[in-house]
Amino acid sequence: MADVGEVLMSVLSTIRVPKPGDRVHKDECALSFSSPDNEGGLYVCMNSFLGFGSQYVDRHHARTGQRAYLHITRTRKTKKEEDINTGSGHPPKKKPTRLAIGIEGGFDVEQEQYEEDIKVVILPDRQEVTSEDLTTMPDVVKERVSLSMAGIMAADSVSHTLQVQQWDGEVRQESRHAADLKQLDNGVKIPPSGWRCDVCDLQENIWMNLTDGKVLCGRRYFDGTGGNNHALLHFQQTGYPLAVKLGTITPGGADVYSYDEDDMVLDSKLPEHLAHFGINMMTMEKTERTMTELEIAVNQRVGEWEVIQESGTTLRPLFGPGLTGMKNLGNSCYLNSVMQVLFTVPDFQSKYVSNMDKIIDDAPSDPTQDFKTQVAKLGYGLLSGEYCKPAPDPGDENDASEPRGDQIGIAPQMFKALVGRGHPEFSTNRQQDAQEFLLHFINMVERNCRSGANPSEAFRFLVEERIVCQESQKAKYTQRVDYMVQLPVPMDQATNTEDLQEAERRREEGDSAAPTVRAQIPFTACMAALSEPEILTDFWSSAVQAKTTATKTTRFASFPDHLVIQIKKFTFGLDWVPKKLDVSIDVPDTLDLSGLRATGQQPGEELLPEVAPPSLVTPDVEVKGILGYHGNEEDDSLYSPLLSPVLDDSTVSQLCEMGFPLEACKKAVYYTGNTGIDAAMNWIMGHMDDPDFSAPLVLPGCSSGPGTTPTESVSEEHLATIVSMGFSRDQATKALRATSNVLDRAVDWIFSHLDDLESMDVSEGGRSAAESEGRDPPPGPRVRDGPGKYELFAFVSHMGTSTMCGHYVCHIKKDQQWVIFNDQKVCASEKPPKDLGYLYFYRRVAE
């Protein structure tokens, strides 16, 4: 051991003891999905605390010179070992009472028991040092190495820390109405049982208003179950904010909802408020599930939706390359489904998987934080087949059930943490919208592919919008880039209207045996709703210099290699409660969109003049010249005055009272021309996701925001992003200067000024891009084009009442066989429910 001791002494200065804040990656390899559970275990660098599988630890040593690694191997205890250790077989699992992980009342982070073996390994010869070996070494070596080993093992792994942070426990807050709640002395006394809605006699989902004691039913769900909204309607009529769910009252509390705060809340004076209406909390027993129990039931009840998951048949498990399952990290099925589909697209395979070795060679010192590395790692994990082994037997020796298709699979913890970092939704473990995540990921790909191949181009296409003024018959053409077709669902086109009406009638009559009937919507009706002209009633026509009616027609200016179609199933009811349309749509296997090809300006067709609408100013406004818009990008001597807009103060005030930011309210009123609250509200709903939603109003004609100058330098990062989309640097600079350096606004601006950009010939340096490169710069984004004929190769389905709950699975066609990917379960599909999908993926048919 002398040699090993000498080696340890030589590397002692590189061995660190983890401190608070250090990120310890002891559960997952930074470059693969190797873990302590896999053959070969995991090697944790005792300096950087990065983990590496056996196949990558030598590479890390060669690149960094680090030699000391803590080798962790973990084996799962058998059922008998667990029973012996616990002494009494299986202790009953504690039922979760909060949507949380790793905290009291929440889900346990780890249920299975493992035995761990650790030792220090010195590279490059992989000399091993066990804890016993350390006892014979000098004190200085023994102390430093032992402290480092203990610190690494005691530290929470990054994945564990993220799990606990992301599931934040759904802790309810005290209602602002609780302390001073007004209660009417109206003599109302509520019995301890037998409650019915005062309006419709419903006996389930019953709530009592804590101000007047009214007993009414709760909200109605999309499928007709739940209540009839009478408690909500009562609040809208009276403004009485708090209600308690009868049947959930126990000595420990009850479900209290604040309609005004639109959330479940705490009421510290609940015993007093209930006693006012004759209810003694200490004698009450729970007879209905609480709202948390209902939510947890949805999250745990993954096998409930039989049709989409094909649970009515025995499915044949599949294993092999491209058939690897993904572990659910806690409501991460939306991510799993989207990424499974994306890595069947050749562009993503060639960009990330085919170049895996080069990407790893070029990875930064901390590859866990590198987008390209983590995407390549995920792609290789899904396609290589290395991780699609059957999951180990759960331990029931007498279990003779048929195989379920569960795999060991991969747990995309680093990937999820990286793509969700800083995002208010994707950084949590709450359920998300798969469509929103797809666009979020494509946006990240765009930002990270400024040079070389960009796989998101497979989905990118141009949309042409043609607006025709109905008074002058003159037209305006604009183009914008898009990655997805959002297909409306015309519910009035259902082919089984009579069945729907009959089922609705029976539910209203309280018939518990009334069947759930799904609306049958023809796909052709959805396409017709997409392609038919839209009527614009408040269109400002530059031809007639006034507001008039116009029609807007949307067509494809290019057809992408791969087309994504979203069925717009999620909407809002009349009371602004989110709901999901329960529909069946006969989505075809093949699609011909050739008839929706844009044609551009027609022969003899006149275009609307390029004249801006009049500014909203008063005649007596004092005009002051300031450094604002300049007519020539290179001549700062040409200024135009910035005019102060006159806004309808009452409309601005109404919007502010709804809780919207003041500057957003000003913009809504300005851009809708002072036409009233409805138009302004529609503008706000359509722009809430804009990055500059709350930014100060910058008037058209002023290219600079407050406190800036027209010559202010633009963001190099934003420039690179726009240039990567196929525009010249001069074009990108002009767009950013016209939009106060806001990237998303600049991209929108550039697509609406393509005609102007084509004529650009002067750059900041005095030479055009055409002169410097010897050719004209491309006038638009880099898009592919071809025939508009497609075939279906994948679809993502959602089960549940809204995007914020439920479960996602995907079906992918591989070698003419439909395969269902349900997290870790990968099986041959027997009855792919193509009529119930949410996102559909088509690829171009080669001619």
Image (cartoon, rainbow, N blue to C red):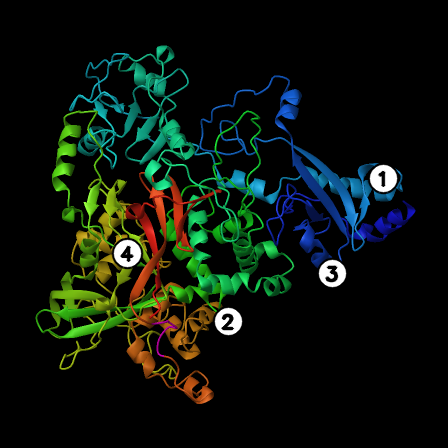
Q: Is residue 581 visible?
A: no
Residue highlighted by disc 4: 486
Q: Are marks 1 and 3 in contact (CB under 8 Å)?
A: no
- Closer to the chain start, of discs 1 and 2, is 1
Residue 81 horizontal side relative to residue 795, left or right: right
Q: CA distance from mark 2 to mark 4?
A: 29 Å
Residue 110 horizontal side relative to residue 282, left or right: right
Q: Which residues are magenta?
A: 779-785
Q: Residue at x 20, y 45 (%)?
A: 520
Residue 174 location in percent, x, y? 39, 30
Residue highlighted by disc 3: 62
Q: Quadrant of residue 572?
A: top left
Q: Residues within 10 Å of mark 3 (few under 14, many from 20)?
A: few
Residue highlighted by disc 2: 452
From what the image shows, is residue 622 above or below residue 134? below
**Does residue 547 show up magenta in the picture?**
no
Q: Quadrant of residue 341?
A: bottom left
Nearest the camera: 534 or 124? 124
Residue 550 horizontal side relative to residue 588, left or right: left
